[in-house]
Amino acid sequence: MSIRQYWLDLLTGATWQEFLDAGGDIFGFRERRWKIVQHIKPGDDLLCDLTGVSRWIGVLEVVSSPFKDTSPIWKDEAFPCRVHVKTVITLTPETAVPVLDLQGQLTIFHQLKSPLAWTGHFRGSPTKWKPADGEIVVQALLDAQKHPVGRPVSAAKLARRPRALNARVGSVTVPEGEDASDGELQASQLPTAHTEIQWLLLKLGHDMGFDVWVARNDRSRGVSGHQFTELPRLKSELPLQFDDATNRTIELIDVLWLKGHAIVAAFEIESTTSIYSGLLRMSDLIAMQPNLNIPLYLVAPDERREKVLVEVNRPTFTRLSPPLAEVCRYIAFSALRKRLSQVASFVRYLKPDVLDDLSESCEIEDA
């Protein structure tokens, strides 16, 4: 008897809804995935994951052999490599199962080289999954269907269209300059935005009970009448045991959360025209300390999201071990501000995993 095969199926909130609106009986993939799609057989299951929010939302059973068709189903792309399916389980974005809820069960979370290395398993679809992992996902979705639990979900993330960046690994070029029409912040606002976000991250870490560090050359700054040095947990010296070169790099990272001698999280804030300074510090840190197991975050304005993702995936950074995009996540200014307004009354009870839902992978999805 053949073993049921499970395939990862990546969707945005928009493409999932368009699939349902079209009848929920045909699913498609991009043209370049045809060679892989041809391995999908009737009886296989597609495990549907919402990108951007990292939640399992459904299971589709394949009921036909693969075929090609460009009849309109999806708004932005044809997704011509198709199979007929029937829906086995469908949840809502609010009741969908967070991927991280299964981290104690799925093998993709075993022996990670970095806390975010699991995101490398969600870079493209269809991707064949281990039967044991597939069964765990299906069971979790069945349980969620019987006993739904509502969780807030970002409407902005759900509304995103499929990502089709041209800057795939190996093809990124160094830009000659920034386009003035990119919707950048005005130059006079940039220091204020950078300093404001530094303060918000320092205050969040401080209120959660961590020691905090601000880049050595920014210690004298403040915002809205608050000086960074007002925070009792702001460290004046880094309690780290690295070589001098590593320490000099770490001292210039915009914000660190610390627990004893350990770094809990590191943040680079990129609101200026160039985003390279923070990326280079992060890449230097990985190059010098490849076994440093800490989450790294790039925090930038919403309108710079695509630019950040393109630059993180440049060849010079993808050749690191681990690749920079695998260990860094992106946080939008608006998402940070909104979340802080929501948790203000109970911030001291939060844990660092509050950043998981707040952030998104920097890897370019090849779905």
Image (cartoon, rainbow, N blue to C red):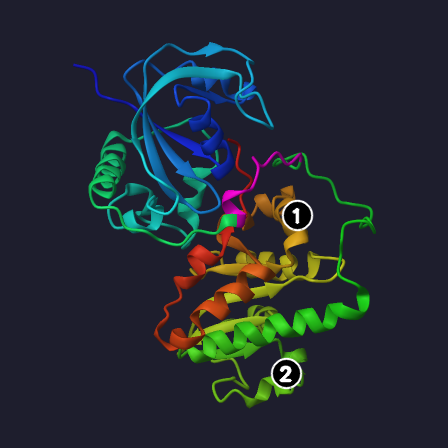
Question: Neighbour class for label 1 at 10 Å: few (<14), some, many (≥20)?
Answer: many
Q: Disc 1 to disc 2, how far (Cα)?
A: 28 Å
Q: Quadrant of residue 39?
A: top left
Given the image, on which type of amino acid does mark 2 rest? Arg
Task: Residue 164: say if magenta.
Answer: yes
Q: Nearer the viewer, residue 219 or 134?
A: 134
SS for dot 2: loop
Q: Nearer the viewer, residue 69 or 150?
A: 150
Residue under numbered circle 1: 311
Q: Position of residue 294 (x, y in %)?
A: 44, 62
Q: Are marks 1 and 2 in contact (CB under 8 Å)?
A: no
Task: Residue 216: say if magenta.
Answer: no
The rendered magenta stretch, by its main secondary structure, is classed as loop
The N terminus sits in image quarter: top left
Would residue 361 be seen by someone viewing this image from the given angle? no
Relative height, residue 290 to residue 61 (above, below): below
Residue under the point 34% across and 43% down: 96
Q: Is residue 2 left or right of residue 161?
A: left
Given the image, on which type of amino acid does mark 1 rest? Glu
Would residue 194 be seen by someone viewing this image from the given angle? yes
Q: Which mark is residue 219?
A: 2
Please report the bounds of the magenta region as a residue range.
156-166
Quick one: label 1 or label 2, which is nearer the N terminus? 2
Q: Is residue 28 left or right of residue 252?
A: left
Q: Is residue 21 left or right of residue 159?
A: left
Q: Position of residue 345 (x, y in %)?
A: 41, 76
Q: Which mark is residue 296?
A: none
Q: Nearer the viewer, residue 237 or 339?
A: 339
Q: Is residue 6 left or right of residue 127?
A: left
Relative height, residue 133 to residue 216 (above, below): above
How many marks on residues?
2
